[in-house]
Amino acid sequence: MKKRKTVIMGAAGRDFHNFNVFYKDNEDYEVVAFTATQIPNIDDRKYPSELAGKLYPDGIPIYDEKELTKLIKDHRIDEVVFSYSDVSHEYVMHKASEVQAAGANFIIMGAEQTMLKSKAPVIAVCAVRTGCGKSAATRRICQILKEAGKKVVAIRHPMPYGDLVKQKVQRFETYEDLDLHDCTIEEMEEYEPHIEQGTIVYAGVDYEAILRKAEGEADIIIWDGGNNDLPFYKPDVHITLVDPHRPGHEVTFYPGETNLILADIVIISKEEFADAENIIKVKDNIKKTNPKASVIDASLHITVENLERIKGRRVLAVEDGPTVTHGGMTYGAAVMAARKYGSSILVDPRPFAVGSIKETFKKYPGIDNLLPAMGYGRKQVLELEETINKADCDTVIIGTPIDLGKIIKINKPIVRAKYELQEISKPGLKDIISGLIRLY
């Protein structure tokens, strides 16, 4: 039988997972290439032979997605597998049209087809868009489970942007582990809050190997999702967050709508800052899409110290990078803190941006008076530092989940805007989760 020539479209996460669980060692397919988008500096590499398996002794090349049509025609590709997240339904079909016109089939793999089965119970925390508040929800759930006497391990959606072989299985328990694995800012934003809470977190590239390691030290595993991607593990409880600041996105983005349909529990976050009509619209869409789900009203409570550094001051708001880039949010915790505590002006960072930070603003023109905390490599971290230090402001408000001042040297007073999930409605997470899996 002739092998089906395949290209996998991705962003260094779901694409590698789909390959590992379905295409690796599969004699019916030849994966000719991966294509990369969304994340800087991940194209022009290889998925290494050490991870690709016996069929790919030279590894698998990774190209920029701009080369997709050429790859299809040059290699007579049979099918292209769409394997990344947080894009509109319209965007997905534009890609499908491009692939079809070039002569290949356009494939989206089924949700359960790529979910691995765990020996331990799994609670998956997912979302309909990037920046809904998954991290805060995950921390809250970990707290509930620990109070019930459970050993909890979080497994985080992949962010392998460095040496993929070294990143096959990563375990984080201490701050030293962040240095050991040479983490990017985006990785630290996800791992550091778990470490602060005393929760062990795993991540990497090979999610079956990761799962087997985590099962050895967990009563319950938390799938800490990335973007609005689907879980890599079959969940016993599927929790999906929706955002009333982006009403309608819960049914118009891929694969977020799938997460909404699959959810046992839907959390509506950030309600304290949302318009009432937007909350109603989101609730109507939940009811139409998944009427059986339990719905929890919640807020993301923002706290800051040193309020005098904000009131009446010119502030630079530094926000979580993915949330305001491909997540499409026009504000985050730092902007909300600036507004809540009376800053005189939000400083526009664009005139001070350098290097790849300047390019980020060009790529995402919707970003206004805030600075995304981009840091996908040491060079970009230094460019972020230079941009902040050049900015003409009195105070820098950090809205990312990490203490950015420990990573870069900032020449201005810093205020951190921290946020935690607070349930508004009853029953809350503890009671609903207890009804789905045994906690006591």
Image (cartoon, rainbow, N blue to C red):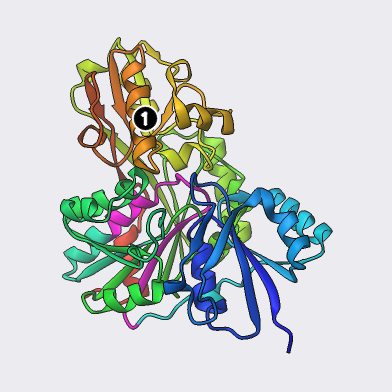
Please report the bounds of the magenta region as a residue range.
Answer: 119-141
Other residues around mark 1 within 10 Å, as few (<14) / some (14–19) / many (≥20): many
Asked whether the viewer can see residue 315, the reply is yes
- Residue 124 is a magenta residue: yes
- Residue 150 is a magenta residue: no
Q: Is residue 144 above or below residue 393?
A: below
* Image coords of residue 255 (percent x, y): 58, 58
Question: Looking at the image, which residue sits at the far bottom?
Answer: 1
Q: Is residue 237 above or below residue 27?
A: above
* Image coords of residue 314 (percent x, y): 34, 12
Q: Nearer the viewer, residue 24 or 288?
A: 24
Q: Is residue 167 left or right of residue 58?
A: left
Asked whether the viewer can see residue 121, the reply is no
Q: Nearer the viewer, residue 257 or 414?
A: 414
Residue, x 54% and y 60% (percent of image)?
260
Q: Nearer the viewer, residue 151 or 422?
A: 151
* Image coords of residue 54 (percent x, y): 49, 82
Quadrant housing the N terminus: bottom right
Question: Looking at the image, which residue sits at the far front?
Answer: 58
Q: Is residue 224 left or right of residue 99?
A: left
Residue, x 18% and y 22% (percent of image)?
306
Residue, x 42% and y 27% (percent of image)?
371
* Image coords of residue 93 (percent x, y): 74, 54
Where is residue 163, by image quadrant?
Answer: bottom left
| Residue placed under numbered mark 1 in the picture | 384
Quadrant housing the C terminus: bottom left
Q: Is residue 174 left or right of residue 258?
A: left
